Image (cartoon, coloured by chain):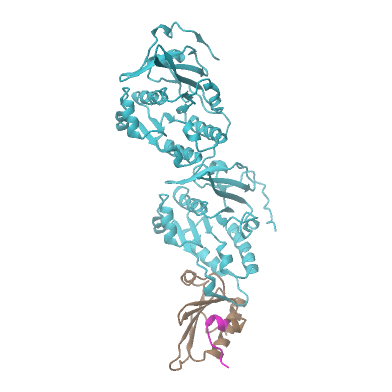
Chain colours: A brown, B cyan
Amino acid sequence: MMANTGTGKTKKTKGPGEKEYQLRLYIAGHSAKARAALENLNKICETHLEGRYKIEVIDLLKNPKLAAGDQILAIPTLVRKLPEPMKKIIGDLSNEERVLVGLDIQPLK
Amino acid sequence: MAEKRRSSSQNTLKKAPTGISGLDEITFGGLPAGRPTLVCGTAGAGKTMLAAEFIVRGALEFGEPGVFMMFEENAEELTQNVRSLGFDLDDLVKRKLVSLDHVHVERSEIEETGEYDLEGLFIRLEHAIKSVGAKRVVLDTIEALFSGLSNEGILRSELRRLFRWLKDRGLSAVITAERGDRALTRYGLEEYVADCVILLDHRVNEQISTRRLRVIKYRGSEHGTNEYPFTIGKSGLSVMPITSLRLDHSVSNEHDPSGIGWLDEMLADGRGVFRGSSILISGAPGTGKSSLAVAFAVAACTRGKKAMIFAYEESEKQLVRNMRSIGMDLSGCVRKKLLRVFSTRPTLVGLEQHLVTMHDEIEAFRPDLVVVDPISNLTIEGRVSDIKPTLIRLIDLIKKRGITAIFTSLTSGEQGQSAETSEVGVSSLMDTWILLSNVEHEGARRRTLIILKSRGMKHSNVVRQFLMSDRGIFPLDGDTHPKRSNKRKVK
């Protein structure tokens, strides 16, 4: 299940007229926390943002330079690059409700 | 919780010199090498400046590149602030001697959900350290994390891990922290950084501000325990460490004449005062203290020596003009770069600031003779108890360099009050004491001079009358020729 991570992108088709979410998940090696965060993120996106999101996973152990750019301190950190403004969620994303608040997503009923 | 004490079997702890004038003396060589040091203080106490100087001087003077990780200012702000101390951070960054990283945490942008750690911070730090081969690290002010992240439990355990991590890598680190109300630091960082703690303080007393520095703790090393005044000046921090009252100055048997023939005759048969000694010239207003003191300076310049005048009552131009009226040409000496006049209003800064300024000026000009005119003016804003320690420090500073020092002091002009008692105990610090006074005689005021003491040399005990004219300072009383006068020998 980590096969599609690394710096790869998971592309979905976008529905017309809806904003696309560009998300970036910063991890440092494939720790348990990183795995949990990615799993939780995939699940939340599939549920609430189907077809209109991109996830980019950045492993800072491989690309330490990238940490400064997005002001990353905590690991894992999820950054919402788009839509603006930029938002950050730190932690393993285990609390779905807080993630949705953090990403500013209206939960689907 | 206390950190485990490392087996400190080695007697001498390795030190990382700061290069900050005075601080290395207090700490006997610098901050602990390969260990973290906590620098705490109130806002504006100079924490960032101390940290920045540690990094800059480390890179420039000690071949130790450094990382400056800032949590409050950004890189441009820091570069600008440090430029005011005469350091060019941009250049150091370009030369790969220093790496700057601005860590910005904004709570409003961050949502927290679930477990996390601060590995991102570690990775950034490690990346910066590797990029310049850093031996020194500054974290300024890492406490900002407490306002940026809400999970204090995680934060604390990660900070503990961070300090251990720095230690394991053998990095000499300076961690700055804001002073707390009850504890040393607001978030109790002293719990984690236990090797060396330095406290900075910025006090305002009677509208005069003074910065002070104290080494609270230095595990495994002796250190000065006093509060030391310091300043942040054109060339960085200056700490005045001088309470080393060991009185082990080297002494000179050479003399420095005043250039006034009859006065020198009164001191060691014409040879004048000892080089490197301190001379007090005291007297009521208008008795000629400044003129006499400046005469010493001019005499030194005439012999090709360098002299420096700290004038706290007159501007340089005024001094030049006034001295010309009694036949002394200061501007010529200034042109030949043998004389420097440093004049400033005494009330402008605090006593310690004066001391530090003098120290810096003396270091820069390296004079053979120094005139401070007058020391009594420095006491106006300070309490009487302040002047003596400061003066001791100043005399120490001057004597260590073998510089002859002339101090003038104003005594109150009132009749009946003994001049000898009005010198706030300062006279005991002086090797030679010359007292000037005005006496009324046959309808005119006459200037008189007496040598109250002069350690280690023959000196005349006769009261001499003298006259100041456009050709110099002359004796009036031909009948008390020194060859015929009473002389007493002092051991």
Residue A87 image offset from top left, x and y in percent? 50, 77
Q: Please give the name of the residue rendered at 47% of the width and 54% of the height, measured from the top-left corner.
A: B65
The magenta region covers A99-109
Instruction: Return the residue found at the far front.
Output: B443
Q: Which quadrant of the structure image shows residue B3?
A: bottom right
Residue B40 image offset from top left, x and y in percent? 57, 53
Q: Would residue B333 be visible to someone looking at this image?
A: no
Residue B269 image offset from top left, x and y in percent? 44, 12
- Looking at the rendered structure, the number of numbered marks drawn on it comes to 0
Q: Is residue B398 above or below residue A44?
A: above
Choose between B362 and B454: the one closer to the eye: B454
Left/right of residue A62 with respect to residue A35 in the rendered view: left
Choose between B14 and B423: the one closer to the eye: B423
Residue A52 image offset from top left, x and y in percent? 48, 89
Q: Would residue A26 be visible to someone looking at this image?
A: yes
Q: Is residue B11 above or below residue B149?
A: above
Q: Please give the name of the residue rendered at 50% of the width and 16% of the height, measured from the top-left corner.
A: B457
Residue A36 on the magenta segment: no
Q: Which quadrant of the structure image shows residue B242?
A: top right
Q: Quadrant of the C terminus of chain B?
A: top right
Q: Quadrant of the N terminus of chain B?
A: bottom right
Q: Is residue B134 above or below residue B390?
A: below
